[in-house]
Amino acid sequence: MSQELIIGAVVVGVVVLFFFGKILLKRRPKETYFMCARCSAVSRHTERTIEAWRNNKTKFFCQSCHAKWLQSRPPQERERFTSSDGSRSGCLGVVVLFALAPLAGFLLVQAYV
């Protein structure tokens, strides 16, 4: 194997491992439970509260208090928080990345051969 091929393979491998790490190894709070900031009920963390924790929030609310808060919002603002149409999970970008990574590796190899 030539040195350029090895370097290209290492670069592609590092990029792929970086994206796998970002996708699969998301940070989680060490505590499984939290105390609701409104009603003081002890609740288990959900995806919503874990995402809030990742965004450095310090107050968490149980599902029922969160639902009450959503009901108190105006309809336009409520749609923003409950609608899943506007949220983008990034799946398409990841699929395109994994489809293009082998192609980029192939083109690197062909450029140096």
Image (cartoon, rainbow, N blue to C red):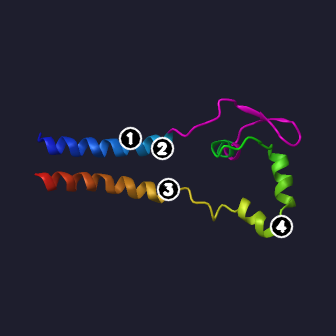
Residue at screen point 68% across, 46% down:
52
Q: CA distance from mark 2 to mark 1?
A: 9 Å
Q: Is residue 42 magenta?
A: yes
Where disc 1 sits, the SS reads helix
| Comparing labels 3 and 4, the label whose residue is closer to the camera | 4
Q: Nearer the viewer, residue 33 or 95?
A: 33
Q: Amino acid at mark 4?
A: Pro
Q: Earlier in the sequence, mark 1 or mark 4?
A: 1
| Comparing labels 1 and 3, the label whose residue is closer to the camera | 1
Say which residue label 3 marks.
Answer: 91
Q: Earlier in the sequence, mark 4 or mark 2?
A: 2
Residue at screen point 51% across, 38% down:
25
Q: Amino acid at mark 1?
A: Leu
Say which residue label 4 marks.
Answer: 74
Say which residue label 2 marks.
Answer: 22
Q: Residues within 10 Å of mark 4 (few under 14, many from 20)?
A: few
Q: Residue furthest right?
A: 39
Q: Residues within 10 Å of mark 1 (few under 14, many from 20)?
A: few
Q: Which residues make up the magenta segment? A: 25-49
Task: Give how far across and how far down residue 86 sits, in percent.
Answer: 63, 64
Q: Earlier in the sequence, mark 3 or mark 4?
A: 4
